[in-house]
Amino acid sequence: SQPPNNDNQQEIEELISSLPKEKWWRGSGLTLYQNFWVPSDFIRGVITLRRHFIGRDSNILLASKPKTGTTWLKALAFSVLHRAQFRPSVANANHPLCSSNPHDLVPFLEIMLNGQPAGHVPDMSGFTDLQLFATHVPYHFLPESIHQSQSRANLEGGAGDWSMEEFFENFCKGLDFYGPFWDHLLSYWKASCERPERVLFLKYEDLKEDTARNLKRIAEFMGVPFSKEEELDGVVDQIVEMCSLSNLKELDVNKTGDIFGYENKTFFRKGEVGDWANYLSPSMVERLENIMKEKFSPFGLYF
Ligand code: A3P
């Protein structure tokens, strides 16, 4: 199919230069685009996604705020989708997860689109055939085509010279990659309430608590439910084990190398629910809890 007409390169550059910008601890800072702080390095890809990406019914989109469990969800979804081709097992040295970081197996849309010259709309007919994509953009950045098509969205979850206090202050103000955190999360929460058959909302906490049960929900949602035979054969448990933090963290491919300028190993840390509070002072914890209570309580998302 024909790609849409190219954008006017000058118009895009003028738009970008008119948007508010803030420093960030890495890269070339953050740019405020439609009320969200997008890493300036990826702003062109995000604008192209917003304007031109055409979803297909066969697309499955893993959408998450950075640091909410994206890497894990990518590993799980990839293993589920390709289980017929690649036998999921920690003993299967030929499984792609043994040789590739999950981010290499499930690409971010906005990063794929970012490498284009400004204003040039890429021919996306080739890669929209891929079934599984990821994105960090909030729900309403996804083009109308995604909202209306049958394609699906999921959510699951080095510090430069910034101090923790600076990070914290900025995070509370919403100044964070693809922040504000609460608005990002609520964009998908609301979409999942409006279109539960098309948007599955997953919490990292729930995935941790009962990975097998939630993996079955994911497979069903993706349209590839586990059969009774597969369950009896232990396929669900094997995927859970293969994608566990302890397994992925110890693979050479994840101990070395880097992706998007981050060392692979930084994506596999502790994975402990609530651990954030151990890095903040009691008054910071209280402040953040109050913000979350205010933002999430109206939606029954804060307990
Ligand atoms: P912590 O920093 O709390 O340890 P993202 O992938 O969106 O960047 O999220 C990173 C978080 O997910 C990190 O949390 C990381 O440890 C955790 N994580 C990565 N792989 C995981 C896995 N296989 N199982 C559970 N948690 C995982």
Image (spheres, helix red, strand yellow):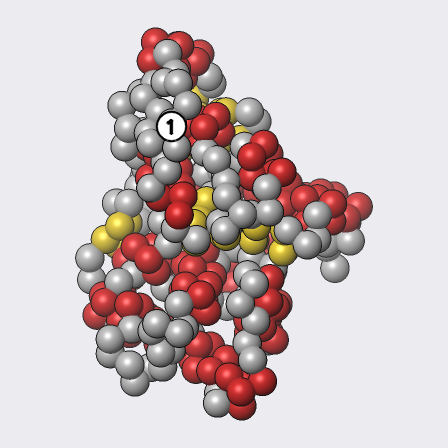
Seen as rendered, the residue at the extreme front is 1
Residue at image x 26%, y 63%? 100
In the displayed structure, does residue 34 sit left or right of residue 106?
A: right
Graded by Cα atoms within 10 Å as few (under 14), some (14 to 19) or many (20 or more), the crowding at tag 1 reads few
Secondary structure category for the residue under label 1: loop
Task: Specify whether 202 is left or right of 264.
Answer: right
**Amino acid on which the number 1 mark rests in the picture:** Gln
Callout 1: CB less than 8 Å from ligand 1? no
Check disc 1 and report the residue beneath it. 2
Question: Above or below — where is 106 with respect to 47?
Answer: below
Q: Can residue 237 be seen in this view?
A: no
The answer to whether residue 84 of the structure is visible from this angle is yes
Give above or below for 192 relative to 47: below
| Coordinates of residue 75 in the picture (x, y in percent) | 40, 64
In which quarter of the view is residue 140 placed? top right
Q: Which of 36 and 158 is in front in this view?
A: 36
Give me the residue at 68% from left, 44% from top: 191
In the foreground, 303 or 283? 303
Q: Where is residue 89 in the image (x, y as percent from the top left)?
A: 36, 81
Residue 293 in picture, x, y percent from top left: 73, 48
How many numbered circles does the render carry?
Answer: 1
Residue drawn 50% across and 43% down?
Answer: 56
Q: Position of residue 201 (x, y in %)?
A: 63, 55
Give the residue at x 50% y 80%.
Answer: 236
In this rendering, would 244 be left or right of 184? left
Name the image quarter holding the N terminus: top left
- The relative height of residue 276 versus residue 91 in the rendered view (above or below) is above
Q: Tell me the quadrant of the picture where the C terminus can be found.
A: bottom right
